Amino acid sequence: MERGRKKFLGRHLMVKGKYVDLILSGKKTATIRKGRWVPKFKELILHGGGRPFAVAEVVDVEYKKLSEITQEEIKEDGFDSKAELVEELRRAYGEISDDDIVTIIRFKVKKKLTELDVKDPYMGLEPVEIARLALRYLELNEEDKRILETLVRAGSLREAAIRLYGDIGARWRIRKAVKRALKELVDRKLIGPR
């Protein structure tokens, strides 16, 4: 990535599978990335080991040269030393120098997708979160895909029902699509206990 050029981070943050347990246990509360990364959203879905594992809130974003990284920031990213961090950055990005800009994205896990509430109809997730996961991981029929895409764009069951059917009374149709998607996400072990 060119020095100074911004790269935008969408709703999904990918991490290596070896970091999943560190994040879920609260030992890793940040990610340091080479370049200037700008999160477009306050809430992210974290993915690692081939599946989504948490919903997190971005609490801070900081830009600095690699040479300015502190030991505390290294620990937040789950490393014991700067040498470990630099080695991991080299694996991910190739060459990196002390003058390169890095982004520190600090986050707080809001929901662990490995520990869902089975008593809740949506297992503790919001319908929009389920729709985002389904659209990313499942092969959906055209109707469910249309419904879930509308739900994501609309942001609520009520607004999606109005956009799709012109009537808030049709929310049941959207709920059924969301529940089908949730069941498949769980059945395929994409969310829920590992």
Image (tube, helix red, strand yellow):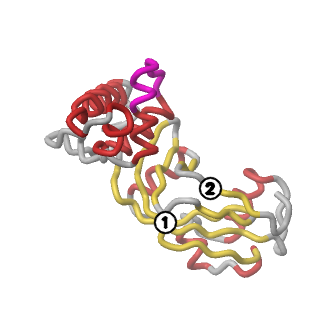
Quadrant location of the C terminus in the rendered image? top left
Three-letter residue code for mark 1: Val
Q: Which residue is mark 2?
A: 9
Amino acid type at circle 2 is: Leu
Query: Marks 2/1: CA distance?
Result: 11 Å
Magenta segment = 138-147
Q: In the picture provided, is 132 more to the left or to the right than 34? A: left
Residue under pointer 1: 58
Badge 1 marks a residue whose secondary structure is: strand
Q: As rendered, which of 127 and 33 lies closer to the eye? A: 127
In the picture provided, is 97 more to the left or to the right than 180? right
Quarter of the image that includes the N terminus: bottom right
Q: Secondary structure at mark 2?
A: strand
Depth check: 102 or 120 in front?
120
Please provide percent x and percent y for residue 45. 47, 50
Q: Residue at x 43, y 43 (%)?
A: 152
Res. 155 in view: yes
* Residue 144 x %, y %: 39, 24
For the point 84% across and 74% down, which residue is it? 99
Q: Which mark is residue 113?
A: none
Q: Earlier in the sequence, mark 2 or mark 1?
A: 2
On screen, residue 58 versus residue 14, left or right, reads left
Residue in the picture at 35% in, 59% down: 110
- Where, by quadrant of the figure, is residue 8 drawn? bottom right
